[in-house]
Image (cartoon, grey):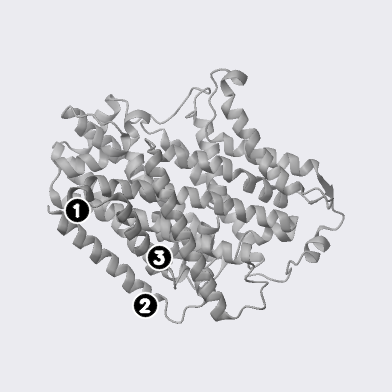
Amino acid sequence: MSTALVVSILVAYFAVLILISVLTSKNADSESFFSGNKKSSWYLVAFGMIGTSLSGVTFVSVPGGVGAGAWHYYQLVLGFFIGYFVVAYVLLPLYYKYNLTSIYRYLEYRLGFNAYKWGAGYFILSRTLGATARLYIVINVLQTFVLNEIGFPFWLTTLIIMFMIVVYTLKGGVKTIVWTDTLQTVFMLLALVVCIISIQQTLGWDWSTIWHKMQGKNMTSMWGTDVMKKDYFLKHIIGGAFITITMTGMDQEMMQKNISVKTLKDAQKNIVSFSFVLLLVNALFLFLGGILYLYAQQNGWEFAKSDDVFPSIVKEHLPQGIFLIFIIGLISALFPSVDGAITALTSSFCIDIVGFERRKDLDEKQKNKMRQLIHLGFAALFTLLVFFFKWKDEDSIVDLIFVIAGYTYGPLLGLFSFGILTKRSISSAKIPIVPIVCILAPLLCYGLDHYSKQLFGDYKFGNEMLIINGGLTFIMLFIFSKKEANLTQEIAKNGFDLTASN
């Protein structure tokens, strides 16, 4: 298949996204951009969240990781499943009760201005690093397996893709993304199913034979039983639950689309239905990884990087039409994880850092202009970070993303947990308690991880680092807090509209 045809398909795909953007962004204003006017359909949000949650990392790295880790990743997925119910029945009711546009306003109302700013700041840091890591892996695959053949440089590919994303998200924001994510999820899942069936037909085995061969080669092993290793099942399940609670329930990008649904009940339907679908979709990706490795072993192929397994086999050993579908699926996995991130980061920066809700001196036209400049600024930052990841050249981005989450979402977990689970308030002393705690907790976690061999022997920290980070934040906040005699009065004093609810 000619590279020109692949490029033509990508251009046509982008044109469809632009068309959706034009149709959905008519008469769009700041409210449309930030919250979709609270008119999003829950089933569209639920379906689109599949693409946002999985991203290009799942599309490439999860199948590639089966060779070394079998189905151990599914332990995390089971943890994710548990976490979504906490999001649906603990966090969403809180956000809807107080009609929040930025979920970090809760931290201000409950714990003060510093907690609000640091909570939003950690989200901006974490989502920027995580989203650019996801963006890098997809651009790198496109570059390696398609665009290098026509001499297209990596830097130009990155600039063009970022330009595409900015064009269709700049005006409509959430209102547009709800629809584009739905379309892209369809293409991604279609590519997944087509690739599985194509490899199965190439192998010439029935599904039962394939499963038994996977079992024979220990590719379906799911449970890690060595407590000293990172993939110990309790570390994965409990860590996965907290990853969901923080990376979904305390993440403005994921919650921005959920709270754009009109009612709490519909938003909960979205989360619960999405959590069940995610169990199936992740199982399919792991099953795909097993088929890929069976096919590779049958032919004596080896790969230097696990992330190259899926694209290499599809391009070099399957029909050209399948490779085209793979590219479309890969692009469809890329855009939902990046367009939503840029939109959410823009929203958070405008509301939480610039203070749109407080700025009475700005009219709608001025806000739109400022919002668009901030949007472009994040696009530029994303571009620079993709170049950094290219220079860094990590083998598998999945582990890197969870490491980033452990350090940056930990303080968020501690802040929200302290606000929800206690009736205490932060001391009003001149010492800035919240900033000190939010810096010190991740530093202590880094020290634990860095010196783990000296301190704990062969014990390896995994996803429990997120919980430890959040726990340290919680404990230090508790130490420097005071009992609030009338919490309701205190919250009202800080600006909480106690009558607001949906």
Along the viewing direction, whichever of 299 and 112 lies nearer the viewer:
112
Looking at the image, is 189 positioned above or below residue 171? Answer: above
Q: Which mark is residue 169?
A: none
Question: Which residue lies at the image location 44% right of the left edge and 63% below the top edge?
Answer: 45
Residue to which mark 3 is pinned? 166
In the rendered structure, find residue 324 and report the number of the disc placed on it: 1
Using the numbered discs, state the Cα–Cα distance from disc 3 to disc 1 in whole angstroms: 24 Å
In this view, the residue in front, 411 or 207, is 411
Q: Position of residue 126 (x, y in %)?
A: 53, 49
**What residue is shown with label 2?**
23
Q: Amino acid at mark 1?
A: Leu
Task: Give the alpha-carbon distance from disc 2 to disc 3, as whole Å.
Answer: 16 Å
Mark positioned earlier in the residue sequence (2 or 3): 2
Q: Is residue 329 left or right of residue 469?
A: left
- At x 42% / y 36%, what residue is drawn? 73
Classify mark 1: residues with Cα within 10 Å, few (<14), some (14-19) or many (20+). some
Closer to the chain start, of discs 2 and 1, is 2
Residue depicted at 42% across the width and 45% down the height: 388
Image spot of residue 298 (x, y percent): 17, 29
State the CA–CA distance, disc 2 to disc 1.
Answer: 28 Å
Check contact, mark 2 vs mark 1: CB within 8 A: no
357 or 375: nearer the viewer: 375
Kindly report which numbered mark, 3 or 1, lies closer to the viewer in this rendering. Answer: 3
